[in-house]
Image: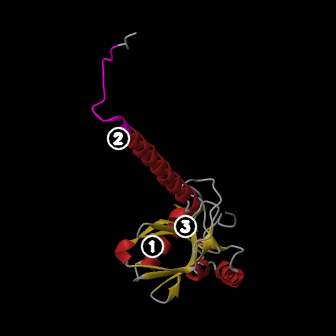
């Protein structure tokens, strides 16, 4: 009996075809391992929202004024890293205050402008102290010897949160003296 005629015949000898197939399988396995490592590193370092983020290693992050952007009254971008100021709360966007003269202003924008004025002073250095629920680094930062977290609360541009209890006294003084947002009417809640 005759064997059916093949239309395609590999030019590789049978023993080489086995090695090539084995090499392809090994390559695919290595590619799958690389993809797994990449995905696990994205999850571990905050690449996806809604994932529990481990605390970053304690450390210090520094940037020159040209490398700093103010995101809002409590958030900075130092180079490519987003940092939230630990222990402070700032108003949400769109909340307005009335001034004694009858005019009004956006409280969140005023807080952000106060932070921008502080970081224009020079290099910013932040001591990293964990992450918030969105995976952003939490830090105590300073610019030209001024602690930004404390200065915003003392100036009346932010409230003291629960993470840095030492700022509560600064907030009470700012309220009593009508500094920053506390000097405007309607600034009691945020």
Q: CA distance from mark 1 to mark 2?
A: 67 Å
Magenta stretch bounds? 5-17
Q: In the rendered view, tell whether residue 122 sits above or below residue 37.
A: below
Residue 5: image location, x then y, percent: 33, 14
Q: Secondary structure at mark 3?
A: loop
Find out whether residue 14 is within the magenta segment. Answer: yes
Of the residues under marks 1 and 2, which one precedes in the sequence? 2
Marks 1 and 3 close (CB-CB < 8 Å): no
Q: On the rendered structure, is 160 left or right of 73?
A: right
Residue 102 seen = no
Q: Residues within 10 Å of mark 3 (few under 14, many from 20)?
A: few
Asked which colour scheme the image uses, the reply is: secondary structure
Query: Mark 1 highlights which residue?
Result: 116
Query: Mark 2 highlights which residue?
Result: 16
Residue 147: image location, x then y, percent: 54, 84
Query: Mark 3 highlights which residue?
Result: 101
């Amino acid at each position: 009996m005759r064997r059916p005629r093949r239309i395609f015949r590999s030019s590789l000898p049978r023993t080489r075809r086995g090695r090539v197939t084995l090499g392809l399988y090994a390559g695919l396995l290595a590619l799958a391992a690389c993809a797994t490592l990449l995905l696990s590193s994205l999850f571990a370092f905050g690449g996806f929202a809604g994932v529990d983020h481990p605390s970053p290693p304690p450390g210090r992050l520094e940037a020159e004024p040209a490398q700093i952007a103010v995101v809002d009254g409590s958030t900075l971008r130092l180079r490519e890293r987003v940092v939230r100021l630990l222990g402070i709360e700032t108003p949400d966007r769109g909340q307005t205050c009335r001034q004694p003269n009858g005019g009004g202003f956006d409280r969140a924008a005023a807080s952000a402008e106060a932070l921008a004025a502080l970081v224009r002073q020079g290099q910013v250095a932040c001591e990293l102290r964990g992450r918030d629920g969105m995976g952003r680094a939490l830090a105590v930062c300073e610019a030209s010897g001024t602690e930004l977290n404390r200065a915003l609360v003392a100036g009346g541009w932010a409230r003291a949160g629960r993470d840095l209890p030492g700022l509560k006294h600064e907030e009470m003084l700012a309220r009593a003296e009508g500094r920053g947002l506390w000097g405007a009417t309607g600034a009691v809640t945020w």
